Every structure is written in C-alpha cells, then in structure tokens.
Amino acid sequence: MKSKIPLLVLRYVVLFCFIIGFTSQSAFSQGRIVIKPMLEFSWQMDSNFHKAETDEKEVYTYNIKPGFELEYATDKTIVSLDYFADVFWYDDQDTIPAGQIQADDFDYVGHNALLRSYTQVSDRVFIGVDNLFLISSDPAASDAASNAIDRYEYTLNRFSPRLVYNFGEKFGLGLKYTNLMMDYSDDAVGQGEDSTENRGTFNLYYYFTPKTSFDLDYQMWTRDYDKLTSDYDSQQVMVNVNHQLNYLTVSAGVGYHTRDFDKTVSSGDIEKSVWKLSLMGQNPPDAAGTPRSSAYLSLSNNFNDLGTGDEYFDAIRLDAKFTYLVMDKINFILAGWFQNSDYETSAREDDRWLVSLGADYLINDFLSVGLEGGREERDSNAAGFDFDNDYVMFNINFHPTLGAK
C-alpha cells in the first residue's frame, strides 16, 4: 500500500487541476453555478499514535485532501455536491520489532461526498434530500459519542429525504426518513461489525416570535447488526427551544430515550432522561468570510448509537471552539471536548478529553497556512484503557472560488 500512495496523490492532484480547467469557463457562462475547488495538505506528529496505555510509538502522519464544492441554484431550488478525497500515509519514528503492527499498515485513501437537493415547492411546502457517502477509519465519523480508538476502515452511506409543511407563519411540520448503512472492509471478529439503521423523525414547530421557536422532536429507529451484536429499537422524544440574541443563538432541549434489545444483554433494556444545551454565534453575525470572533459550546447527555459487541454507555459530552481574528490575518483557535462514558454493560467508566490551540495565517482570500498543537487523554477505572497523546500539526489550505452569479 505504501508504494502506491505517491501515485494516488499524483492522480488526485491531476484530477484537481482538471476540475479547475474544465469548470472555470462553464461556471461563468452558466451564471447559476458556484465552483470551489480545494486542496489541503497537513503533517502531524503524534507522541502516542496507537493511543496505547504502555509502549507508546511516535508517528508522523501525512494527509492530502483534494476536492471541490459545487452548487447550482435557481429561485426555488439548490443542488450541491461537496466532495474530497482523504489520502493518509504514516511513518513510524521508532523501531518496530518484527511481527508487530507498523504505522504504514494503516495507510489508506478515504472519500467523503455529500449530495444535497432542496426545493421550495410552494409557499408552504419544502422538500429535500441529503446523501452522505464516506470511506473512513475514524470511529468518530460514524458516531458522535464514540469512545473507540480503533482504525478499522469502513464505508458509510446515509440517505435522508425530508418534507416540511408550514401551516402559516407560526406552525410547521417536518418529516424525515434516514437510512444508514455501515460496511467494514475487514469485519473479522473484533474488527467492526456491519450494521443498518432505519430512522423516522417527526418535528412539530412553533415560531413564538421571529427570534424564538419551540419544537417537539420524536424519533424512532432500529439498528440491525450482521453478526452477534443484539439488534435494538430506540424511541426518543424531546422538547426544544431556540432563541436568537444579537450575536448568539441559544438552544436547549430535554426529553426521554428508551432502547429495547432483541436479545438478552447484560444491561437489559435501557432508558434515561436526555438533554442538550448549545450556544453559538459570531461577530459580525453576517460575516461571509472569517469573522472577527466566534464561539461554539455544546453540552449533551445521551446514549451512543453504534455499540458493536453490545457496548453501550451513558455519554455526557462537552464540545467547545473559540476563534479570534487579529489584524485581519491571524485567526487564533482554541478548541476541545470532554466526554464521560459510563458503560451500561459493565462497571467501566471513562473520562476522555482533548484540548488544542492553533492559529491560521490568512495569506489571501483563498490560501492559508496553520499550526496547531494539542493533547488528548483518557482516564478509565478499567485496566488497559488509559492513554495520553500529544500532537503537533502543520497545514496548508487552498480554497479558491471560480465563479458565481
């Protein structure tokens, strides 16, 4: 695999150049198309690449990410396609004994494609469909509450048609169906398990004022696994409120979640109260490019969805990101997250967190370079699950806009 990486990189760079050459004329002639090619490169050093409790290994990671954003718009319809390839290759900085896993065994080429289509059929009816396709080895891309550290490659496809009907200025009804399929490249025992999720979502909206809204959100879904993990049925109902201030939007929700398993699991069926709270905003609020400052905070409590091996836990998670632009050129970024995972099927409980500090130098409207450093830790009451990892990353980002009208 390692010997093929440079050739794959060359192919994607050629494809990237072809997109620029082909679309630069059509984007302007059509007048309704916006093309945004992208090319990103990063280098990262991890002190504990495998996130092991002992026997830490330092590894360099090289990543190149060519892609594009394409949008076609009319007065009532928007169709967009966001795509990028994710080419990773790894280089051990320590001597690896014969027979042990080497970092370059994890070299791979990922893909991420998001197709969206939205149409305002009438003043009252809005329809849309999203389809996300990705090939990844990042467990966080398959479950936002993931506590896994594995690097098993998988293919994910999520298809979501939706309908929104507005009864008037105050009331609205939303319906959405989601089909999610996960297929692991190597689904051997302990290396991931294929699964399918089917989810229905019902939303009833009430717009109290132009800046304040309430909604009742009801979801029911099934998760079916291909092997030994028990299938389950989940139901969740939440009441949410959203309020917009001058620069900030505050959202809060509270509800109840029940999960019933098809087989007997050690935890039995599980249920709990769930909640979420978020705050986000930027100054100025209508900034098209990089704002002078921005803030994002999210705190939530719920179960994880993907529980291969019947490993489900009650997750309390905090995500945060703050940015500040200096002299219109240097964008400082402070970010991090914390998650407490209290397992339902054992006495295991983990505290895991990551904090990072970085800065991007904005050379012009489409080219930037950045430097970031951070630390990740996991502390567990179960043996073998602790780890800490320090990292440093350098990146170059190229994001031009070819045409818009």
Image (cartoon, rainbow, N blue to C red):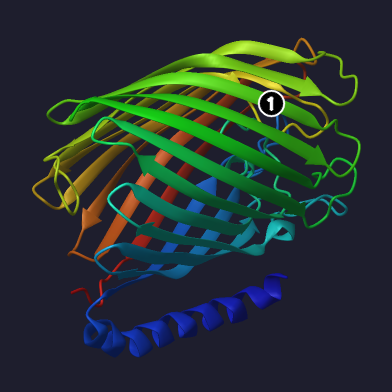
Q: Going by the image, does 158 lie left or right of 307?
A: left
- Quadrant of the frame with the C terminus: bottom left
Dot 1 corresponds to which residue? Answer: 234
User: Residue at image x 44%, y 70%?
Assistant: 67
Quadrant for the N terminus in the image: bottom right
Q: Quadrant of residue 213?
A: top left
* Left or right relative to 148: residue 297: left
Residue 270 is left or right of residue 377, and the answer is right
Indicate the secondary structure of the residue bearing disc 1. strand
- The answer to whether 6 is drawn above or below residue 391 in the figure is below
Q: Could you say which is closer to the camera, residue 290 or residue 87?
A: 290
Q: Which residue, as the protein is rendered here, is positioned at the far front?
A: 167
Q: Is residue 105 above or below residue 384?
A: below
Q: Nearer the viewer, residue 9 or 391?
A: 9
Which amino acid, mark 1?
Ser
Looking at the image, can residue 70 be seen?
A: yes
Whole-percent x and y of residue 340? 57, 17
- Residue 386 is situated, as x and y percent measured from the top left of the image, at 67, 23
